[in-house]
Image: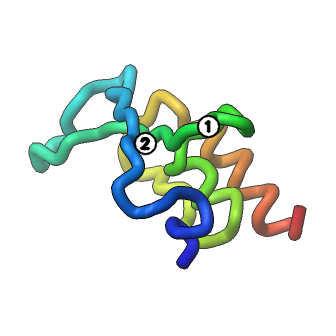
Amino acid sequence: SYLLARAKVGTSVTLTLDDVGSRDKYGRLLAYVWLPPREDDLPLNVAIVRDGLAFAHRRFPSGLAAQIESAESQAMSGR
């Protein structure tokens, strides 16, 4: 329901690869998901953390680590 509130089924998304690397040590693709319109200018990955539905994973490097950790702080403080 979270995703359906943000985008209808069939909505096209844009993926941008992480600046740190496009794959992790397990071969998984590291990308950020962008939904139109980009009104808050946050990738979906960061918005999910900000909204308290995920947490910042600090084990592996990320090009948006600071932004993701800030989003997690906002979620934990109830903002």
Q: Quadrant of the N terminus?
A: bottom right
Image-quadrant location for residue 75: bottom right
Residue annotated with mark 2: 33
Residue at coordinates 48% horizontally, 39% vertically from top-left? 34
Residue 9 x %, y %: 39, 63
Give whichever of 9, 79 is nearer the camera: 9
Q: Is residue 49 above or below residue 22?
A: below
Question: Is residue 75 toward the left or the right of residue 57 in the image?
Answer: right
Give whichever of 73, 48 is nearer the camera: 48
Residue type at tag 1 = Pro
Residue at coordinates 48% horizontally, 61% vertically from top-left? 8
Question: Is residue 47 toward the left or the right of residue 20 in the image?
Answer: right
Q: Is residue 62 above or below residue 20?
A: below
Residue annotated with mark 1: 37
* Foreground: disc 2 or disc 1: 1
Residue type at tag 2 = Val
Image-quadrant location for residue 43: top right
Q: Secondary structure at mark 2?
A: strand
Q: Secondary structure at mark 1?
A: loop
Q: Residues within 10 Å of mark 1 (few under 14, many from 20)?
A: few
